[in-house]
């Protein structure tokens, strides 16, 4: 399974703003992972990603679909991102979403 930190740049935080916290921890700095830059795949790439249609019904959640298809509910955001839905509250019963089958393939396609 893909690591959530794969291809993420690291920044060293030595900010004066955190001086007291760093001092309590006994360190001079901490390394922090930068937020990844994701890219919505163009149509030709999307066409190469195998998906299944899912009809949104009562009780559905992205995390449940991620668990079903990827074995890991923490990849719920992949389904939302792929469907250009920032949250599942935008869905109505009967809406059809596409669930990418290969997690590795869709993560590569979005630059993760």
Image (cartoon, helix red, strand yellow):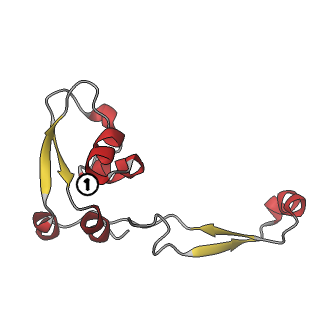
Q: Nearer the viewer, residue 64 or 30?
A: 64
Question: Residue at coordinates 31% horizontally, 47% vertically from top-left?
Answer: 66
Q: Is residue 2 left or right of residue 8?
A: left
Q: Quadrant of residue 102?
A: bottom left
Where residue 23 appears, x then y in whole percent?
89, 63
Judged from the image, the secondary structure of the residue bearing numbered disc 1 is: helix
Residue 3, picture quadrant: bottom left
Total numbered labels placed on residues in the image: 1
Decide which of 92, 48 is in the foreground and name it. 48
Residue located 46% across and 63% down the image: 4
Horizontal arrangement in the rendering, residue 1 relative to residue 26 (left or right)? left
Q: Quadrant of the N terminus?
A: bottom left
Measuring from the top left, give residue 69's x and y in whole percent.
25, 50
On screen, residue 107 above or below 80: below
Q: Position of residue 42 (x, y in %)?
A: 18, 67
Q: Is residue 9 above or below residue 99?
A: below
Q: Residue 98: x and y, percent?
A: 17, 48
């Amino acid at each position: 399974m893909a690591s959530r930190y794969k291809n993420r740049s690291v920044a060293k935080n030595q900010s004066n703003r955190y001086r007291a916290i760093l001092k309590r921890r006994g360190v001079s700095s901490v390394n922090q992972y930068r937020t990844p830059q994701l890219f919505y795949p163009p149509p030709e790439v999307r066409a190469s990603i195998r998906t299944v249609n899912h009809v949104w019904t009562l009780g559905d959640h992205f995390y449940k679909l991620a668990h079903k298809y990827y074995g890991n509910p923490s990849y719920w955001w992949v389904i939302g991102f792929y469907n250009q839905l920032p949250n599942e509250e935008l869905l109505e019963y009967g809406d059809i979403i596409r669930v990418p089958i290969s997690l590795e393939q869709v993560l590569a396609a979005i630059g993760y």
